[in-house]
Image: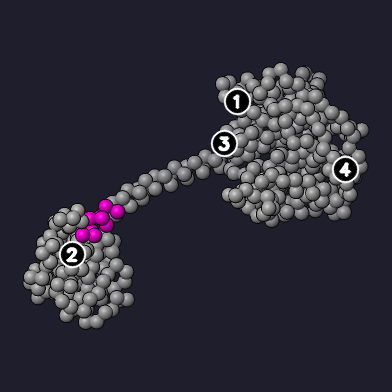
Amino acid sequence: MTPAFQKAKHGVISIISNHTTPPILGALQSAWPAYLPRPEFRTQTIEQAGVYPGRSATGHPALPLADAVLITPDCLGDDHALSAALDVLWEFARPALVLTEAHDAARFGEGVLTVPHNSDPAHIAGMLGAFLMRQPTVETMRRDLHTAQRFQGGLTGEINKLHEELRLAATVQQAFLPQSLPSVPGFDFRVFFRAAGYVSGDIYNIQRLDEQHFGIFIADAVGHGVPAALLTMVIARATQMKTITGNRYTIHSPADVLDKLNAELIRHNGHATRFATAIYALVNIETRRVTLAGAGHPPALILAPGREPSPIQTEGGLLGVFPEHTFPSVEFSLGEGEVLALYSDGFETAFPDNADRDRKGRAMPTRYYLDRFTRLAEERNELGMSAAMRRFVDDIDSQAGSLHQVDDLTALFISPSAACPLDDLFEGRPATHAQR
């Protein structure tokens, strides 16, 4: 005897009929195949079959569910009772065979087989026997599904909790970012900041230091998600552009800012190496002289219409790695109509091309962002900085896969110019939702 037959030897078949002793019962017992274990036959009314196990119904007590059910033609006249019985069988994954005057499978729905009522009893017995052999496997699958659904419910709750915690983390991180851009006569600032997920590994700051200076800072913690975001909070607290002592203050040079930040990151790292890249520019408002130092960060760019972007190379290494490392600075002047761009390396995958993807379809680094930065400088001269920035944001949004960007995106654009009337409306305003 095969294992399937052995599992079926305790099977129960329920015959649903209006007769206490249905005529088909004796025929089935006589025609039952010798190679199949003989089941236990029970009879019940169609009303009893429609009561859920464990529940009571006046006059119709629920009976234990059988492994397979045979519904005789005399029960097919009461559509309401028949529908209730089939609902119970469907919910508990019990197979049903209906004896009909004619094949009418559409009436009974899925999971129900129909055969003519005058079919050979041996044929009917063979079908019921197949149900019995199949049912142990169905029951095992049903229990496994129930267990999986229970675990899924718990997992869904944990995921929802995690999402809520990440939303809270994003709110906390936003508090470390500038809530408004400084108003500096003769200079225009624009910011694009977009996290790849709930939280970002990028952080930035634009701060007016005194009547003659402002500082521009951007950092990128290596990695993604919560670990990188936590490191940005350390960076935000450790970045000191100036020190105030009583009635006096000292503006720190870019080299000193990065040197102190490097020491602080090393102190926080302990035994785990977490590092970041950064770039800091100190701008003299009157002379437009820029002093800039970098720490392993993509070079700042000077953008101007009609010419290639000019990178400002720096020699500083990564932050949080070498205790005695120095961060030499460079100086240059920002001319009328030029735009200084500081940005994170996420833009290398922000403008992908179908030819620039690996075998898994992932975007590969490109230099297309340089063309888009140059176009922003051209549109800024033609339309004003506000309109140019809106077009820049639209271009980012139009990229394939922008809803699942590979990396965090941050860009700061600073230009010395006499602001146009439309741009005057936006001076000192908070960064908009589209940009943040």
Amino acid under disc 2: Gly
Tag shown at residue 298: none
Tag shown at residue 338: 4
Amino acid under disc 4: Glu
In three-dimensional space, the C-alpha distance between marks 4 and 1, rounded to whole angstroms, equals: 38 Å
- Compared to residue 239, the image places residue 173 above or below, namely below
From the image, tell me which residue sits under label 1.
273
- Compared to residue 228, the image places residue 91 above or below, namely below
Q: Is residue 425 left or right of residue 5?
A: right
- Compared to residue 109, the image places residue 358 above or below, namely above
In three-dimensional space, the C-alpha distance between marks 4 and 2, rounded to whole angstroms, equals: 85 Å
Depth check, front residue: 215 or 254 = 254
Q: Residues within 10 Å of mark 2 (few under 14, many from 20)?
A: many
Tag shown at residue 129: 2
Q: Is residue 171 visible?
A: no
Point 79% across, 37% down: residue: 300
Residue 329, percent from left and from top? 82, 26
From the image, tell me which residue sits under label 3.
226
Q: Is residue 111 left or right of residue 69?
A: right
2 or 1: tag closer to the N-terminus = 2
The residues colored magenta run 133-141
